[in-house]
Amino acid sequence: MTIMNEGETGVMMQGDLRTDETDATLDFATFHAKSHFWGRLTIWSVIVLTLALPLYLSFGLDFHPGWSPILSGFLAYASIIAVVWFIEPISYYPILGVSGTYLAFLTGNIGNMCLPSASIAQSVVGAEPGTKKGEVTATLAIAAASIVNTVILVFAILFGSYLIALLPATLTASFQFVLPAIFGGVIAQFAIKKPLWGIVGLAFGLLVNLGPVPASMKTFLCILGTVVACILLEKLKNKKAAE
């Protein structure tokens, strides 16, 4: 029988805790490594498959329309939306995390499905964005939302047009308010816990939408302005509390 004194027991317990923390860190590092591997593989696969059909139609069946209309269409589209290609990954990453970002950009519908689903799930389980728990929660929420979305899409493709045709025009006209309602629900969750954050978010939303801001920059400026303002307010609050 081995008898250890309190000091030795304490050292062993601390060593076990450090080992557990190291294992957890290594496990999450492995999770990120696998996320990068499968994320890049699936996204590049989708890119190849997306380009396969137009390339086959253009050069396999000789339906190529010429480079001039292709470049004109691309430049016209890029002039409006190109800035979003850089803004969305940066502004959404703090909530989605590494794995959530790959999954969200693979499935699409980030602003109106993936991001709200991740935010709501994090709020429900009490996970802070940017943490390990927050990233895992966001990934599971996006996966669940994507599965539900796929099931609904299959149903909508088969029966959607017929069902919408049966709805009155007054009801179909309200569909345009679905996305604002989703974002309203998300900001309400934060505003309940931090009323000042809700006021800041609404203020930036009104300022950006009523001001002379290009449409392509509105979402980015709303997110960036709200986040920066809330961080500064929290720092000021903590500084006053420390004094």
Image: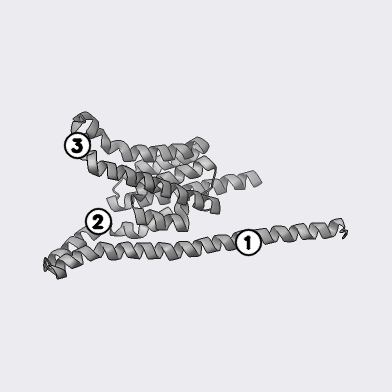
For marks 2 and 3, the one nearer the N-term is: 2
Vertical order, 209 against 78 (above or below):
above
Task: Find numbered disc 2 in the image and state the secondary structure of the residue it sits on.
Answer: helix
Task: Find numbered disc 3 in the image and state the secondary structure of the residue it sits on.
Answer: helix
| Residue under numbered circle 1 | 23
Q: Disc 1 marks which amino acid?
A: Asp
| Residue under numbered circle 3 | 162
Q: Residues within 10 Å of mark 3 (few under 14, many from 20)?
A: few
Q: Residue at x 28, y 41 (%)?
A: 155
Which quarter of the rendering shows the N terminus?
Answer: bottom right
Q: Is residue 226 visible?
A: no
Q: Which mark is residue 80?
A: 2
Q: Is residue 145 visible?
A: yes
Task: Find numbered disc 1 in the image and state the secondary structure of the residue it sits on.
Answer: helix
In the visual, does 145 lie left or right of 9? left
In the visual, does 142 lie left or right of 152? right
Q: Quadrant of residue 84?
A: bottom left
Q: Position of residue 167 (x, y in %)?
A: 21, 31
Between the C-alphas of marks 2 and 3, the distance is 34 Å
Check contact, mark 2 vs mark 1: CB within 8 A.
no
Q: Residues within 10 Å of mark 1 (few under 14, many from 20)?
A: few
Vertical order, 219 against 47 (above or below):
above
Check contact, mark 2 vs mark 3: CB within 8 A.
no
